[in-house]
Image (spheres, helix red, strand yellow):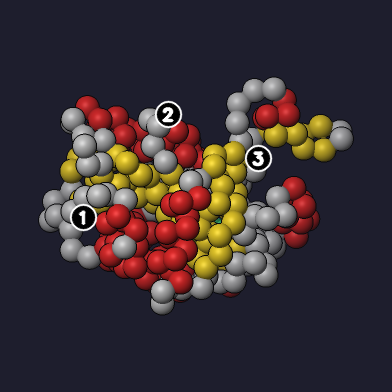
Amino acid sequence: MVHRILIVTAVAAEADSVAAGLGPGAPDPVPLPGGLALRRHGHVDVLVGGVGPAAVAAATGTALAYESLAGGGYGLVVSAGIAGGFQPAAPLGSVVVSSAIVAADLGAETPDGYLAVEELGFGRSVHPVPEALTGRITAALAAGGPSHVLAPVLTVSTVTGTAPRAAELAERHPEAAAEAMEGFGVAEAAAAHGVPVVEIRAVSNAVGPRDRAAWRIGEALGALRHTFELLGRTVLVEAHA
Ligand SMILES: O=C(O)c1cccc(C(=O)CC[C@H]2O[C@@H](n3cnc4c(=O)[nH]cnc43)[C@H](O)[C@@H]2O)c1
């Protein structure tokens, strides 16, 4: 069976950029339960799943179940959108491709420091991403795409807004290049259906002291569009074959 590809964003502006990169789609969205709507671009579906890991996990699970019950199935799920970038690894306007998707606040604070759920003896806080997949994505971006880095992407429920919090996350996850709010939720839903997942983020702001005026959302949405222009002609075609 040839599987479809599902791309999930948090908000409509991100989905619009992804869709613009993919090119013309079907005129009418497919309504899903829960007030969700899939925009179809050939074999690629784009879904606005909501902000935060819980909302997006529910939405992604709904889309996966819907497609499965319709007799098809997804072969790849992509969490996409804008993000905060750890400096200097991920400058504004660059793209981060996830080598792993990490729930950075799924754990417990203790007097001796933070413990991830694995250290507490239950649950998981990391979803791996297939290397063969990230290798194809980075190769496609290297051929004229935005500057990019392959690194872990953190999922947080609270946007980092202070230098001490940014330093704490960087110390705990020294390899991480970006933080956003949905990747782990998308990954949990994909894993429940046995579907591989990758997160692709365009950097709109630096992780650190909150300075909304310094966010470069337009630049990041442009990088997101450029990324999916390239992937729509390469990796997303191969992944469908
Ligand atoms: O105001 C706008 O025009 C606009 C356009 C597109 C997206 C937005 C968002 O606010 C998206 C929220 C989404 O962005 C991720 N994000 C971005 N920066 C960070 C960050 O520093 N830390 C965590 N998450 C970040 C996140 O995934 C949000 O869901 C606005």
Is 88 above or below relative to 18?
below
Q: Residue at x 27, y 56 (%)?
A: 237
The residue under label 1 is 41
Marked residue nearer the N-terminal end (2 or 3): 3
The residue under label 3 is 105
Instruction: Tell me the CA gap for discs 3 and 1.
Output: 34 Å
* Closer to us: 24 or 217: 24
The residue under label 2 is 192
Provide the secondary structure element on which disc 1 rests: strand
| Disc 2 residue type (three-letter) | Ala
In-image side of 206 versus 110 (left or right)? left
Quadrant position of residue 164: bottom right
Of tags 3 and 1, which is closer to the observer? 1
Residue 118 placed where, x, y %?
68, 29
Q: Residue at x 18, y 48 (%)?
A: 29
Residue 109 marker: none
Residue 158 placed where, x, y %?
61, 47
Ligand 1: does it lie within 8 Å of the C-beta at label 2? no
Marked residue nearer the N-terminal end (3 or 1): 1
In-image side of 56 versus 205 (left or right)? left
Tag 2 and tag 3, C-beta contact below 8 Å:
no
What is the count of numbered marks?
Answer: 3
Instruction: Tell me the CA gap for discs 1 and 2.
Output: 25 Å
Q: Residue at x 32, y 46 (%)?
A: 6
| Disc 3 residue type (three-letter) | Asp
Provide the secondary structure element on which disc 3 rests: loop
Provide the secondary structure element on which disc 2 rests: helix
Q: Residue at x 59, y 56 (%)?
A: 151
Residue 124 placed where, x, y %?
60, 31
| Disc 1 residue type (three-letter) | His
